[in-house]
Image (cartoon, rainbow, N blue to C red):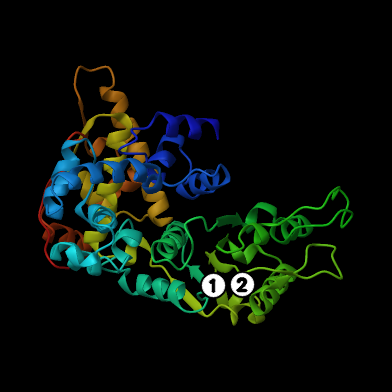
Amino acid sequence: MQRLIELINSEDKKNPYTDQELAEFLSIPRLKVIQKRNELNIPDSRDRRKELLLADLREILKKNINLSERKVTELMTERGYKISRSIISKNIKDVIQEIKGGNESTLPNETLVIKEKDNNKNEESFQKLIGYRGSLRNKIDLAKAAILYPPNGLHTLIYGGSGVGKSELAECMYEFSVLSGVKSKDAPFIVFNCADYAENPNLLIAQLFGVIRGAYTGANSDKEGLVEKANGGILFLDEIHRLPSEGQEILFYLIDKGKYRRLGETNVERKVNVLILAATTENPESNLLLTFRRRIPVLIELPKLTERPLSERLEVIVMFLTREARRINRNLLVKKDVLTCLMMYNCKANIGQLKSDIQVICAKSYVKYMFKNTDEVVIDIEDLSLSIKSALSEGQKEKKQVKNLGIDDLYIDIKNEQKIKMKYTNM
């Protein structure tokens, strides 16, 4: 936590670190960063810079209130902000109303039109998921419906193989709930992995629902559970299949009645308003109680990496390579054969394994260049493991599809984001 605080205190206040960037600095999952940040009552990156951003917007617009959003974005960029026009659009209307004294009729037409388009928060909440306009489009539509359905949303189970992005989708759903106004800005997002206490059912249930003193040996005081902490927000239960049957039964009573008891309580019922998101790598039909399954109306199955279009796999690879380039602070030249192998090899643990494999590849390449007087690291076929390289001699049909993408060498320039010599055909 101390390192997280230090990073946030030292950040560029105009361009604060996102949760993803903090996660990469600390080498922990993004969800952990959100959890720790919420515990410390630290706002997200948008809110941390909002006051400064609004002050600069006021200064610019007081000089000329009729500037277009495009021009305002350019002026903010000149002031050192790394900011998109959509962010300007979200804030400019309130600033102009403030300057004009709330007379909305004086607002520029352009502002009103773009603001209406931005009512759909899908772009901002889910665009970090590669494939949000492609293979995941229907999944995201379902996720949005689960969040928006009145009065309090629909409990949701996300399932699929290890590493397909279940936690990331849950996080996006939480962000969407806040941006769309369904949940308040300070609504909690509580994450719990049911596998952490799977061997001790009493302790697991106590973590979730709380415990009263003397409920079991070692319960020396009353303690609130995560359900109570998640009141008014979202509780994300990862590996829900590891929750014992008695825990599932307590949970579906919570779903039905909005009530629960702490472990050991007999004459007190507590009320909460919690939306439950759950995730599992197992088949929900065979690993969860029927009485629990039927209380979860929305089921979202995420596809394996091999089931995603090749163009999306390539986007995932480029994303991870770009992160590693920033981590080692070197430009990357990635050979065409390397990209082909990464797209074709049998990555059994999906996106999670792909990320780890790319980190190992970049580490091996970095060692070769770390003492050379160059700002560039070249990744070629010899940096790959045998299991990844073997993809070149297998899967002739898929190899032909990769060839049709027209892939060339990839160059990632960390100062100018990324320069990619590639062309795509419709798959």
Q: Position of residue 285 (x, y in %)?
A: 57, 78
Along the viewing direction, whichever of 56 and 343 lies nearer the viewer: 56
As drawn, the label of residue 287 is: 2
Q: Is residue 164 visible?
A: no
Q: Exactly how many numbered labels are in the figure?
A: 2
The C terminus, quarter of image = bottom left
- Which residue is under mark 1? 283
Labelled pair 2, 1 in contact (Cβ < 8 Å): yes
Picture quadrant where residue 228 is located: bottom right
Horizontal relation, residue 203 to residue 293: left or right: right
Dot 2: within a 10 Å radius of its alpha carbon, few (fewer than 14), some, or many (20 or more) residues? Answer: some
Q: Amino acid at mark 2?
A: Asn
Horizontal relation, residue 64 to residue 366: left or right: left
Q: Residue at x 68, y 78 (%)?
A: 257
How far apart marks 2 and 1 lie (CA) works out to 6 Å
Horizontal relation, residue 427 to residue 286: left or right: left
Q: Position of residue 320 (x, y in %)?
A: 31, 45
Q: Residue at x 70, y 76 (%)?
A: 253
SS assignment at label 2:
helix
Extreme-front residue of the structure? 101
As drawn, the label of residue 394 is: none
Along the viewing direction, whichever of 25 and 384 lies nearer the viewer: 25
SS assignment at label 1:
loop
Horizontal relation, residue 338 to residue 30: left or right: left
Dot 1: within a 10 Å radius of its alpha carbon, few (fewer than 14), some, or many (20 or more) residues? Answer: few
Q: Is residue 265 visible?
A: yes
Q: Residue at x 54, y 72 (%)?
A: 283
Q: Amino acid at mark 1?
A: Asn
The N terminus, quarter of image = top right
